[in-house]
Image: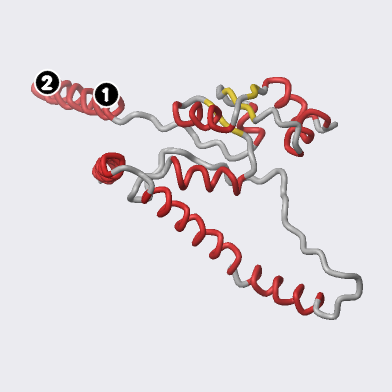
Amino acid sequence: MGFWLLFSLLMTTYYKTALTATLAVPSVPPTINTLVQLLNSDLKYGMIDAKGSEYQLFSSSDVVLYKKLFNKMTFYSSAESMRRVAKGKYAYIYFKSNIEIIVSTEYTSFGGETNLHIASDEFFPGGYGWAFPKGAPYRRTFDHVMLRCIQAGLIGKWVKDLYKIYLKEAQNQKTPEEREADRQAASASANNRL
């Protein structure tokens, strides 16, 4: 009889502990990094209706995935789209470099904390080009130097350095009250991770 009493007490304690732990720690939804994940999620999503290259990619593509995404897409301004993302349950499809700048300057605290996630998948690769006169003798040297900079990771480092400068400039434009609110939010976020 004592064994069953002890067993029942242990199982009840275990059940209460497991239930409390499950209810106390909120489940984190999986991050979305691909267009397939976005299509299969319950998020609403969209882009700006600027008829630019990203709009053309989805609106006139023969790729089934792009067609399905376009049929469910909503269209807002960039500011409204970012506001919806920050509010939750919305994904904004835009050029990654532009979104990185917006997030670092407008949605990142003084301590470098942000609640927004930028997808790692890049489905619309883009780049920049340089125009030289035909037969320019320095073109090969320039190509070689640029390739070495890319391979060494310097371009990525310079872009990150620019984001830090943008963030610092954005922070300097904030009022002291806004900066204090950012510091408190960063402190609270750090305390929540402990």
Tell me the CA gap for discs 2 and 1.
Answer: 21 Å
Residue 103 to residue 167: above or below: above
Give the camera-side residue of 165 and 44: 165
Q: Residues within 10 Å of mark 2 (few under 14, many from 20)?
A: few
Residue 91: x percent and y percent? 56, 30
Q: Nearer the viewer, residue 89 or 6?
A: 89
Query: Which quarter of the picture shows residue 142?
Result: bottom right
- Quadrant where the N terminus lies? top left
Local crowd size for mark 1, using a 10 Å CA cut-off: few (<14), some (14–19), many (≥20): few
Where is 152 relative to 160, above or below?
below
Type of amino acid at the residue the image marks with label 2:
Leu
The picture places residue 88, in percent across and down from the top left corner, at: 46, 27
* In-front residue for pair 165/1: 165
Left or right, residue 82 beside residue 19:
right
The three-letter code of the residue at mark 1 reads Leu
Across and down, in percent, residue 60 comes to: 83, 30
Whole-percent x, y for residue 64 in the image: 79, 29
Pointer 1 residue: 19
**Nearer-the-camera pick, 111 or 72:** 111
